[in-house]
Image (cartoon, rainbow, N blue to C red):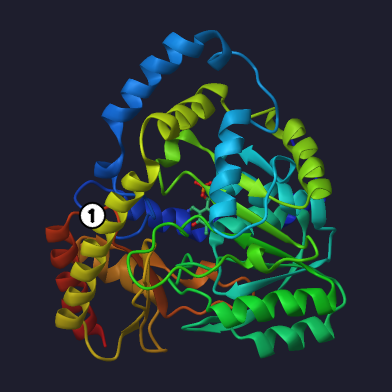
Amino acid sequence: MIFKYASRIENVKPSAIRELLTLGSQPDIISFGGGYPAPELFPIDKLNAVFLDVMKENGTKALQYSTSEGLLSLREKLVQRMVNTGISCELDNLFIVQGGQQGLDLVAKLFINKGDIVVTENPTFLGALIAFNPYEPEYKTVPMDEDGMDMDALEEILKANSKVKFIYTVPEFQNPTGVTMSLERRKRLVELANKYNVMILEDSPYREIRFEGEAILPIKSFDTEGRVIHLGSFSKILCPGVRLGWVVAEKEIASKLCLLKLAADTQNSTLNMYLADKFMEKYDIDEHVQSIRVLYKEKKETMIQAIQEYLPSSVSYTNPEGGLFIWMTFPKYMDAAVLMRDRLVPEAKVAYVPGAPFFPVKEEINHCRISYSSMPKEKIVKGIASLGRILKEYC
Ligand code: PMP
């Protein structure tokens, strides 16, 4: 049988990263690979209590279909949170999705025609590329430094390419680099989007996980023309298993995205929306987020100290003020995937995510993404010490 797939599937290739993640998932491995939140932070007892409340107070509603936009009282709470961060937002601007990942897919479905250009940071979030690829865009990439995208380079791209549909950015503690876009660049980004008439997709799942420095206003807060779509998520502030996120967009765009959501999955789990809503009603989610920040700060500091102690000076690394990730750069001649497969996993039982798949156009092989979120501190030290030993031999 020859399967006659749609031509768009030609761009959907199994990711080389899967095989490497499988290597990292063996039980005896210290894995800095998956960007999973720390499981000890999941508020299991509180969610248990919330579940009982929901069943008692709203059982039949929570087990019934609801609307594509999502539970009204949860949307109202999220609108208020958005307003508190400086985003001008009303109820019709916001709807609930199955995690930020669904927001990426819906935006791609609404905006990308085959051959349209999507501009991304270089490197960028792999899950976004996986969401965009079936809609057959071409990519242009913008180099980054410690303040995020290089805006002059971005302007050159916008000047030279009339088919740019949107600029995709993860402005806080970016996955994979941990880099945050500065305030000045956020303002310039919106100015450029206005000047060249393109959309901005602001993907902000880590915004609230800031454990150092000052919060920076979201890009959406500078939007005067309705061209910024903002994505938020419960995955890092509550738990990813509830699969809940939200989209903030111009009303016309939000209603079109909601129609696409209706086609994709009708709605999010009513039960999970009730759980998140009741959790926010009964408990102080900001207090919970604060406990997440405290733990990640400790873990990040432990990792940075271990890096300073054990890694050779030829390795450079980012030092994020929040989020889950550090980005490491090895000397140019080194291939991080080969090092992991041939030496690191078999000899040191340590894994990370090799950086190459995070580059949409021209892969760079000498980077890796290291997450400090889910490993206990003693394993962070042990794993980095082993990485250092192997790197010193290899460099
Ligand atoms: N965007 C970025 C930058 C991410 O890192 C992630 C999670 N890894 C997501 C979106 C999707 O997260 P979720 O669907 O769990 O909200």
Q: Where does the image place residue 364, in percent across and percent down from the top left? A: 51, 80
Q: For this view, does 148 lie left or right of residue 227?
A: left
Q: Residue furthest right?
A: 162
User: Residue at the location (69% across, 25% down)?
Assistant: 67
- In the foreground, 158 or 275: 275
Res 173 quadrant in image: bottom left
Q: Quadrant of the C terminus?
A: bottom left
Q: Is the residue indicated by label 1 positioned so its CB lies within 8 Å of ligand 1?
A: no
Res 10 quadrant in image: bottom right
- In the foreground, 100 or 351: 100
Q: Is residue 274 above or below residue 372?
A: above
User: Residue at the location (41% across, 31% down)?
Assistant: 279
Q: Quadrant of the N terminus?
A: top right
Q: Amino acid at mark 1?
A: Met
- Reading the image, the residue beneath label 1 is 375
* Residue 246, visible in the rendered structure: yes
Q: Where does the image place residue 373, in percent across and percent down from the top left? A: 30, 56
Q: SS at mark 1?
A: loop
Q: Is residue 353 above or below residue 179?
A: above
Q: For this view, does 156 lie left or right of residue 18?
A: right
User: Residue at the location (15% across, 72% down)?
Assistant: 385
* Residue 5, visible in the rendered structure: no
Q: Where does the image place residue 372, in percent across and percent down from the top left? A: 28, 61
Q: Where does the image place residue 240, in percent across and percent down from the top left? A: 44, 41
Res 143 quadrant in image: bottom right
Specify few, some or many for label 1: CA neighbours under 10 Å numbering under 14, 14-19, or 20 or more. some
Q: Is residue 106 above or below residue 33?
A: above
